[in-house]
Amino acid sequence: MTPSEGTAAGGAGPGLDHAPREGVRTFTPRWRNSPLTDERMATLLPGRSLPEGPLVPVEAFGRVGPVVVEIGSGHGAAAIAYCRAHPETDLVALEVHVPGVARMLAAAADAGVRNLWVHPGDALPFLTDRVAPASLAAVHLFFPDPWPKKKHAKRRFVQQHTLDLVASRLVPGGVLLVATDIAEYAAHARRQLAHHGRWDVVEGERPPWRPDDGFEAKGVRAGRTVTELTCTLRP
């Protein structure tokens, strides 16, 4: 049996995915913008957007230091909390949901953080086309869409090709943080990380700076357990 034909323990679950699939998204682009959303995007995004083209820290942030990318930042609670706890680091929040981006921009303005930058777009082309190899200190993936149906598992963000991409963008010893309240997604991520073979994974260490609201609070209220994966890239 080849790795791509492998299945989860006990014969359940999807096979490991080794190649990107044309047109397969990890998100569902469905929303409507309110007048308030449009106003926030017009007035607040320009001050936190990135220059076009390759990400060059000194040009984008006005300084050179650690850079972190958060994939799927939602309303920005975790991103803003990280920025407040790590003022020496610049964090780029990637989020496709425009109303969520607008709320994040407003919350960041209220919090007064200056090291949060926002890209309202898909993480994969951003990481592929705009981020240089070995340039990120960390990548955060908190409560991604679990795509629970077996036929949709190919849409989950954690796959072999995305782990390749993230690994190539991290500095040696860089960290990928994954959190999910969905047991099936946690099992999927464990399999993918183990098969990939370039990660030292520690489970159960919750970042002390991350607030427990949003999807995390919803999952806990529903009786689900949050899985925390700290994945350090091997040199």
Image (cartoon, rainbow, N blue to C red):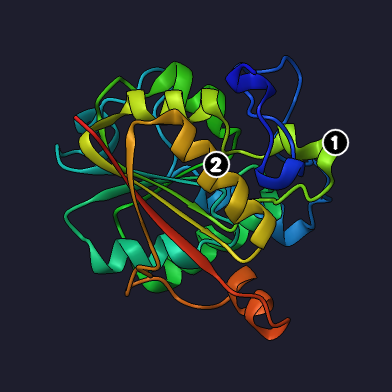
* Alpha carbons under labels 1 and 2: distance apart: 17 Å
Choose top left, top right, bottom left or bottom right for residue 82.
Answer: bottom left
Q: Give the tally of numbered discs.
A: 2
Instruction: Out of 97 and 106, give the one closest to the viewer.
Output: 97
Q: Amino acid at mark 2?
A: Arg
Q: Name the residue beneath numbered marker 1.
A: 151
Residue 55, x across and y down, in percent: 33, 25
Question: In the image, is 45 to the left or to the right of 38?
Answer: left
Q: Name the residue beneath numbered marker 2.
A: 191
Q: Amino acid at mark 1?
A: Lys
First in residue order: circle 1 vs circle 2: 1
Residue 69, x across and y down, in percent: 39, 43
- In the picture, the disc for residue 190 is none
Is 6 located above or below residue 103 in the figure?
above
Instruction: Out of 20 and 192, give the one closest to the viewer.
Output: 192
**Residue at (58, 62) in percent of width and height:** 75
Instruction: Out of 204 and 81, give the one closest to the viewer.
Output: 204
Neighbor class of circle 2 (other Cα within 10 Å; few <14, some 14-19, many 20+) is some
Q: Quadrant of the C terminus?
A: top left
Neighbor class of circle 1 (other Cα within 10 Å; few <14, some 14-19, many 20+) is few
The kind of secondary structure element at disc 2 is helix
Question: In the image, is 216 to the left or to the right of 52?
Answer: right
Could you tell me if residue 40 is visible in this image?
no
**Residue at (53, 64) in percent of width and height:** 106
Choose top left, top right, bottom left or bottom right for residue 15.
Answer: top right
Which is in the foreground here, disc 1 or disc 2?
A: 2
**Residue at (41, 21) in percent of width and height:** 130
Choose top left, top right, bottom left or bottom right for residue 61.
Answer: top left
Residue 64, x across and y down, in percent: 14, 37
Residue 120, x across and y down, in percent: 58, 40
